[in-house]
Image (spheres, rainbow, N blue to C red):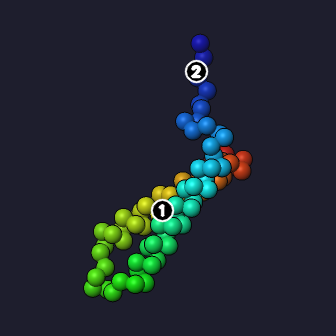
């Protein structure tokens, strides 16, 4: 009994759909961040909301890019 090969927890057939979905969500969250920054005054801005929105956009864009690379055959 040798060691088990490393397998992805996500089926490879899901990579393209996951990349499109996560990049789309990331772009929507990024757009909402920019709209929030452009429409709110400096006194009414919330640092917690800015950090949360930025972290959420970064998460979705990062994993969307990862799945896009995996779907196109670049294994990172």
Q: Position of residue 72 (x, y in %)?
A: 71, 50
**Residue located 33% across and 87% down the image:** 41
Dividing the picture into quarters, in which one does residue 3 lie?
A: top right
Q: Position of residue 59 (x, y in %)?
A: 47, 57
For the residue pair 28 and 3, the one nearer the viewer reads as 28
Disc 2 packing (10 Å; few <14; some 14–19; many ≥20)? few
Dividing the picture into quarters, in which one does residue 49 lie?
A: bottom left
Left-right relation of 49 to 27: left
Let me know if residue 62 appears in the view. no
**Residue located 57% across and 38% down the image:** 10
Q: Residue furthest top?
A: 1
Whether residue 10 is situated above or below residue 40 in the rendered picture: above
Q: Which mark is residue 58?
A: 1
On the rendered image, what quadrant is the N terminus found in?
top right
Let me know if residue 47 appears in the view. yes
**Residue located 40% across and 66% down the image:** 53
Q: Earlier in the sequence, mark 1 or mark 2?
A: 2
Give the total number of marks visible in the rendering.
Answer: 2
For the residue pair 73 and 13, the one nearer the viewer reads as 13
**Residue located 40% across and 84% down the image:** 39
Left-right relation of 69 to 27: right
Of labels 1 and 2, the one closer to you = 1
Q: Position of residue 62 (x, y in %)?
A: 53, 57
Could you tell me which secondary element the residue under label 2 belongs to? loop
Label 1 to label 2, Cα distance in Å? 35 Å
Q: Which residue is mark 2?
A: 3
Q: Residue furthest left?
A: 43
Left-right relation of 51 to 16: left
């Amino acid at each position: 009994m040798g060691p088990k090969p490393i397998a992805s927890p996500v089926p490879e057939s899901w990579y393209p759909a996951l990349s499109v979905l996560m990049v789309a969500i990331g772009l929507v969250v990024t757009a909402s961040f920019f709209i929030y920054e452009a429409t709110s005054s400096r006194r009414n801005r919330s640092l917690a909301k800015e950090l949360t929105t930025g972290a959420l956009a970064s998460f979705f864009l990062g994993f969307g890019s990862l799945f896009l690379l995996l779907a196109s055959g670049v294994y990172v």
